[in-house]
Amino acid sequence: MSKDVFEEELKKPSIFKDESKLSIDYVPPSLPHREKELRVLVRNFKILLEKPGSKSCKILISGSVGTGKTALAKLFGKLICSEAQRRGINLHYIHINCRRDKTEFLVLKRVLHYFNPNFPTRGFSPEELLFALQKTLDSREAFLLIALDELDFYVKRSGPELLYDLTRLYEEKLNAVQRISLIGIAKDTSWIALLDSSTLSTLQQNTLFLARYNASQLKDILEMRVKEAFYEGTVSEEAISLIADIAAEWGDARYSLELLWRAGKYAEAEGEFRVLPEHVRLAKAETHPVIRREVLLDLPQHHRLLLLALARKLRKNEKAYATMGEIEELYHVICEEYGEKPRGHTQIWNYIHDLESCGIINIKLSGSGIRGKTTLISLPDVPASILEKELMTLL
């Protein structure tokens, strides 16, 4: 019976030509309404092509979620490396997600493994990895452009030492060839006050802000992706317009693409050969623009289990907050449900602060009306029912 179901589903025709074109990791060959910003990057980094090694370049790309920060950086990285190769310049672009690689050791390890997948990083300190990176670049006569994505999350969680070390690796040596340049990517700029005066000044003077998209711009983005991801004529114009109008409230291209993908899935599930506005409405009912599926995908297993405990508690609770004790108790129950060994109190406390750093939860100390002092936890932006459903599909 199971085999029959499997084969039946495989035989069904699809309206998708290539679903990967709606993925968060896909970078299209062009970015509608980001041409001006791309020109700014070219102007700031063209010295890497004209006089390689003469200067280290740095820029910060900021803007709210879904404004194209990551896609812009990746597209620019691809274009500048292609031009460098044409000119015989050994330039490499590496994109680091600092939410995944959230320590200096992990970031440097990923960079070194880019050049040498077999490099043995175990037992090395960050200082030793920096020295190894310097030797690698010098021996290969290579230049490196590193994009540090979610840099605001990283600095708030781990401090600014990574930025200092990367920027000063070559700058402090007299007449040294400058081999490392940086692109920082962050939602806002409040965290840069944590940096030293020279780094702070550099980033303040070289910040590229990406404004939110309006409905017309989102429609252009959606139409381009529809051509890449769907077969011709399978997405109605009304559906595209509705998605653009919904996502325009946040100016969020990522959310619009997620709605488009989910609407396509609803159409297929119903046996339809065209995505209609009703499929968009169904997709909107089960998504929320604040909680990102890719953020949940990046979370370790026990972070998800703890978040599920919070979602379940708040869904059944009339109060806006749940106590640390309530969440910890329900977390143990959920661990048993999923066959996982629960972590200790100290580790759970660290997980809670990780989730707060991700912007998923809010925490505060209890005030009057609660005996003693305890930590109160809430979901400020996403409905608990939607978060619970999304987590259960991942778990």
Image (cartoon, rainbow, N blue to C red):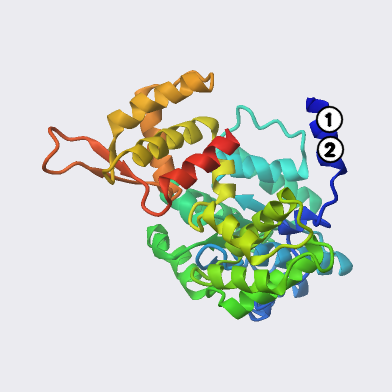
Q: Secondary structure at mark 2?
A: helix
Q: Is residue 336 above or below residue 7?
A: above
Choose top left, top right, bottom left or bottom right for residue 174: bottom right
Image position, residue 89 (x, y; %) = 82, 64
Q: Is residue 338 above or below residue 271?
A: above
Q: Is residue 52 visible?
A: no
Q: Secondary structure at mark 1?
A: helix
Residue at point 65%, 81% (across, down): 36
Q: How many marks?
A: 2
44 or 229, nearer to the observer: 229
Q: Is 215 left or right of 369, judged from the image as shown?
A: right
Q: Is residue 195 visible?
A: yes
Residue at point 70%, 52% (across, down): 265
Residue at point 60%, 50% (across, down): 97
Image position, residue 215 (x, y; %) = 58, 77
Mark identifier at residue 354: none
69 or 102, nearer to the observer: 69
Q: Quadrant of the image for the N terminus?
A: top right
Mark identifier at residue 8: 2
Name the kind of residue labelled 2 in the image: Glu
Look at mark 1 in the image and give the residue it sits on. Answer: 4
Q: Quadrant of the image for the C terminus?
A: top right
Q: Is residue 366 above or below residue 345?
A: below
Q: Is 278 left or right of 160, judged from the image as shown?
A: right
307 or 34, nearer to the observer: 307
Name the kind of residue labelled 1 in the image: Asp
Image position, residue 225 (x, y; %) = 74, 66
How crowded pointer 2 is (Cα within 10 Å; few <14, some 14-19, many 20+) is rated as: few
